Amino acid sequence: RIDAAMIAHYAEARRLSALPPPKAAQLRLSALMTRLSQVTRDLTVQKQRRSAAADRAIVESLDEVIALLMRQSRTLEGEIASMIDDDPLWACLNRAFRSIKGVADRTVARLMAELPEIGRISNKAIAKLAGLAPIANDSGKRSGHRPVRGGRSGPRGILFVVAATAARHDPHLAAFRQRLQSAGKPKMIIRIALARKLLVILNAKARDARREFEYAT
């Protein structure tokens, strides 16, 4: 009871508000994306085994498995795309996200499935959810190195990849990367900073898209 009272007091003091529970469509999209990720990983493993195989029977067996996984991948991608197209809000978010060159189907689906809070919370909060925010490591007068840790690995991983691509086309991201490189920042720091910058941009676009959708409806 004491713990519950303290948690309730903290929530009231910080004015925390709970997000609504996920709808059935959100749960299904998350399930489809999880399965697509599994199939993609399995495909990578089977292709590696195929390249190392020499026996003809083994190669044929692996080819069958690869063909099956590719069919499943295409089916899952089609179902995910249909879900996004059929939902008015998701379709609006899709258009907003894809206005950034380098953001494609997988990125959009991953964000919607695994980071549904995007556009509804602050830039700082979304960065923490994705594990792209530096966490304080201070004690007394000591100011320690502030690493990024925790968060949702799926969105973070794809943001690393997409940010590197987007920085080759988007002048603002390119200039941001150049400033970090000129300052002598390590490559990993630049990689994290680029991913966070992209996420902040996507969060702003999602916020605008949600407002536009609410106004239109």
Image: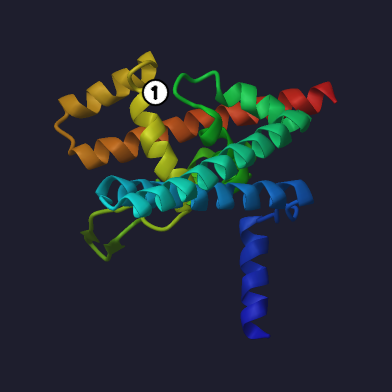
Q: 72 or 56: which is nearer to us? A: 56
- Residue 19: image x %, image y %? 70, 52
Can residue 160 be seen in this snapshot? yes
Q: In this view, does 98 lie above or below 53?
A: above
Crowding at mark 1 (Cα within 10 Å: few <14, some 14-19, many 20+)? many
Picture quadrant of residue 159 = top left
Can residue 131 be seen in this snapshot? no
Q: 89 or 53: which is nearer to us? A: 53
- Residue 191: image x %, image y %? 29, 37
Picture quadrant of residue 8 = bottom right
- Residue 206: image x %, image y %? 61, 30
Q: 162 or 213: which is nearer to us? A: 162
Q: Is residue 188 left or right of residue 8?
A: left
Q: In which quarter of the image is the C terminus?
A: top right
Query: Which residue is found at the position 65% from the left and 69% from the top?
Result: 9
- Residue extending furthest toward the front: 56
Q: In this view, does 127 lie to the left or right of 10?
A: left
- Residue 103: image x %, image y %? 49, 26
Q: In this view, does 70 lie above or below 213?
A: below
Residue assigned mark 1: 166
Q: What residue type is labelled 1?
A: Ala
Picture quadrant of residue 1 = bottom right
> The residue tagged with tag 1: helix, strand or loop?
helix
Q: 27 or 147: which is nearer to us? A: 27
Query: Which residue is found at the position 66% from the left and 78% from the top?
Result: 4
- Residue extending furthest toward the left: 184
Query: Which residue is found at the position 31% from the left and 23% from the top?
Result: 176
